[in-house]
Image (cartoon, rainbow, N blue to C red):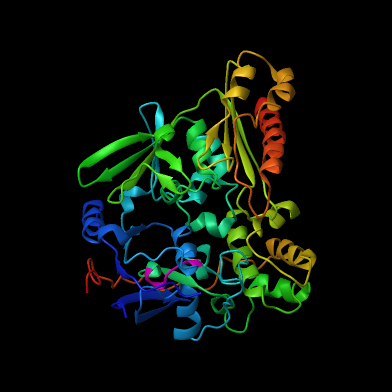
């Protein structure tokens, strides 16, 4: 499949890229790894007039620890995130994205900017209470995960903004697991569950992939487990689907997704507790 | 037609220069412009892995990369794996273990397996199966493919991928070129 025609530029700096993006108007798009955008263009679901390729923005690659957290450059690939075990649950979940070839190209910033609630990193960002740093013509702002994801493929990012960095708090003392259910190995999650447990259930976080238009925190499960213990997991997981309204799709009806949410919540919490 | 962009890409150690449309996919550049038809187009949707090549040493699905994104990079295709008449250990192992039937998925399987063995030189059978998740074979049931990769992993003459490219090409594409033209 051949994508529609577009103009192309590969600027050397973030400022030049932002300028090109602004000048390109509303149909200009940033290109990172391209593993969300190029398939959409081939299906003619997206037809940007200009692609601003970020490949020369080497400042946006890499991971560093700063101020009690991690700063992950937007162009850091899923493969690189998966190898940085100090990132904890983010590394673990990144290693479960699609397949090695996709992880070699797909980037954390690109995936988050795409805002697909079936992709894995949004739920991780939400559970870890991370944020993204966005730069635009009016400067830089930090957007918390709770504010960033707005609806199906809709984020708080403006048309003329670029994610430059993803921030994750250091989750020392937290145990974690990310469980997802797919029809085929490399598929998007029918449902995914990110579970994190601090110490002996002093604190618990659970977030879902693909249970709605955005990633969702399972607050009922979190409350039922906080201060409890492993023995309470089975009962608490029963509340996993409460308040969710997942869209049915080709692979799973809404009811089946709710069932998966309960089962995967139990599995993820048990794995996290045993980690 | 949108304006073309100059690319300079080292393919199997040889620097190639072309003017390309930005929308040209890497797989079509390799097959149609360079005549390297060993890289196959299977699903064309980032699923099957038949189009897998190495971009700067890492396996990628070349149906989901624009040729312009490879400007200044090194690409290795299945044609770059053998050293003259001597097959790469993975090619040898696929041949000896009957790791193919129709052969359509084979170039992608070998390129993905080469990435896997670079990351994990001594994989377990389960690691090989998971490592090849991005490549589909509709003939073999994977059994002999896994056997071949396991054998190649323990082959005494196993080397890294292909002959080393002579030098990294300078990117040709200029800033701002193509914008608003």
Quarter of the image for residue A211 reads top right
- The percent position of residue B40, horizontal first and vertical second, equals 59, 77
> Quick one: which residue is furthest to the top in this view?
A227
Quarter of the image for residue A206 reads top right
Q: Which residues are magenta?
A: B64-68
Residue B122: in sight, yes or no? Answer: no
- The percent position of residue A183, horizontal first and vertical second, equals 70, 53
From what the image shows, is residue A66 above or below residue B4?
Answer: above
Q: Is A100 included in the stretch rendered in magenta?
A: no
Quarter of the image for residue B139 reads bottom right
| Image quadrant containing the C terminus of chain A | top right
Query: Main SS type for the magenta part?
Result: helix
Residue at the image point whose x is 67% and y is 77% from the top: B104
From what the image shows, is residue A172 above or below residue A145?
Answer: above
Residue at the image point whose x is 72% and y is 71% from the top: B93
Q: Is residue A161 left or right of residue B103?
A: left
Q: Nearer the viewer, residue B171 or B33?
A: B33
């Amino acid at each position: 499949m051949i994508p529609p025609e577009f103009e192309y530029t590969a600027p050397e700096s973030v400022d030049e890229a932002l300028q090109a993006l602004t000048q390109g108007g509303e149909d200009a798009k940033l290109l990172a790894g391209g593993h969300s955008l190029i398939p959409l263009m081939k299906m003619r679901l997206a037809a940007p007039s200009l692609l601003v390729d970020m490949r020369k923005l080497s400042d946006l690659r890499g991971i560093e620890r700063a101020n009690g957290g991690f700063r992950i450059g937007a162009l850091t690939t899923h493969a690189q995130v998966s190898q940085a075990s100090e990132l904890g649950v983010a590394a673990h979940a990144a290693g479960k994205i699609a397949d090695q070839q996709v992880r070699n190209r797909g980037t954390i910033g690109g995936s988050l900017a795409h805002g697909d609630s079936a992709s894995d990193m949004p739920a991780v960002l939400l559970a870890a209470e991370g944020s993204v740093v966005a730069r635009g013509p009016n400067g830089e702002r930090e957007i918390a995960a709770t504010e960033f994801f707005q609806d199906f493929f809709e984020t708080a990012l403006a048309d003329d903004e670029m994610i430059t960095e993803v921030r994750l708090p250091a989750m020392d003392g937290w145990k974690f697991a990310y469980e997802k259910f797919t029809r085929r190995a490399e598929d998007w999650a029918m449902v995914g569950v990110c579970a994190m447990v601090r110490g002996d259930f002093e604190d618990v976080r659970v977030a879902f992939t693909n249970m709605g238009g955005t990633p969702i925190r399972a607050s009922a499960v979190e409350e039922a487990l906080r201060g409890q213990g492993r023995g309470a997991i089975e009962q608490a997981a029963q509340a996993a689907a409460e308040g969710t309204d997942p869209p049915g799709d080709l692979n799973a009806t809404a009811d089946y997704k709710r069932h998966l949410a309960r089962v995967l919540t139990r599995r993820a919490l048990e794995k996290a507790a045993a980690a | 037609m949108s304006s073309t962009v100059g690319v300079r890409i080292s393919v199997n150690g040889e620097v190639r220069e072309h003017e390309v449309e930005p929308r040209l996919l890497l797989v079509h550049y390799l097959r149609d412009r360079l005549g390297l038809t060993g890289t196959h187009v299977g699903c064309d949707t980032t699923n099957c892995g038949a189009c897998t090549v190495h971009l700067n040493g890492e396996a990628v699905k070349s149906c989901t990369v624009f040729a312009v994104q490879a400007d200044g990079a090194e690409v290795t295709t299945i044609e770059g794996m053998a050293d003259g008449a001597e097959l790469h250990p993975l090619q040898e192992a696929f041949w000896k273990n009957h790791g193919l039937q129709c052969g359509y998925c084979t170039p992608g399987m070998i390129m993905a397996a080469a990435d896997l063995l670079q990351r994990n030189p001594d994989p377990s059978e389960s690691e090989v199966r998971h490592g090849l998740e991005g490549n589909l074979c509709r003939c073999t049931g994977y059994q002999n493919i896994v056997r071949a990769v396991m054998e190649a992993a323990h082959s005494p003459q196993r080397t890294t991928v292909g002959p080393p490219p002579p030098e990294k090409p300078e990117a040709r594409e200029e800033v701002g070129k193509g914008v608003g033209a």
